[in-house]
Amino acid sequence: VCLSFCAEPVRTPCGHFFCMQCQKKLLAKGNNACPMCREYFDKAFIPQIDKELAMEAMNFNKEEFEERKAELIQDGEWFGENGALIKMVLGNNYEEVKVPTIKGRNGEICRHRWAMFLSLNNDKKLTERYIKEVRYQLHRTYKVNKITIKEAPFMLSRVAWGWFNIEMTIVFQDWCKTKPILINHMLSFEKDGAMRTQFIEGNATDSHKTANAKATKEDLDMLAKVIAGLK
């Protein structure tokens, strides 16, 4: 972590605080633990600037605060009043079926329950601002192996006797004017499953917009980041 003046502090679940810029870099490297006490953060943790603490920092030393703010603005790293980190997650949850009753076509016991999903900040409205639907292509042994989910977090849950690859076709809202993206995801039955997590910079006010709201420059910038995160 840096030793610069902490102008945009983030308070971690364990009670320590670091600047948002350092927190973002740590998460980008896959480091999901506190640099101070090494406690691992909960999967639901999304760094947010502690505005009260930021105000205290400014009142404590306004000159250093403004100097650091100017440096971050110059480097394009200042989040500002509405800036936020958006946590994009896709993949599968997993749990073992305690008392399995479903069998496969050849009599295999289906002991594994999986659930595919795609979410932005675990926020239904924000996710649906960009994603219209997700189409799943399952293994050919499922009687119905092509399923379209139109509501965030686009969750699809089934049981299986073994792991296999799932094709996810992500369809964007009409205003996005972009082609669907195809993602191949191999199911994992280890621990809690397998998920891809990406933190992207966005706007905290995006969650208030509907799917059909008029697109702004900020929306298009965010869309580009979502697409880049999916590829």
Image: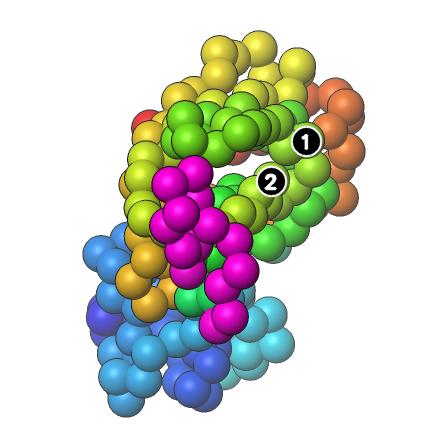
Q: Which residue is mark 1?
A: 150
Q: Is residue 102 magenta?
A: yes
Which residue does the image show at 55% across and 72% down from the upper left? Answer: 50
The picture quadrant where one finds residue 139 is: top left
Q: Which residue is mark 2?
A: 154
Q: Is residue 36 left or right of residue 86?
A: left
Where does the image place residue 199, in percent across and percent down from the top left?
40, 49
Which residue does the image show at 25% across and 65% down from the upper left? Answer: 31
Where does the image place residue 55, in percent across and percent down from the top left?
58, 74
The quarter of the rendered structure image containing the C terminus is: top left
| SS state under label 1 | loop
Residue nearer the viewer, 142 or 89: 142
Which residue does the image show at 71% across and 43% down from the upper left? Answer: 125
Where does the image place residue 77, in percent across and percent down from the top left?
38, 48
**Magenta extent:** 98-111
Would you place residue 227 above or below residue 46 in this image?
Answer: above
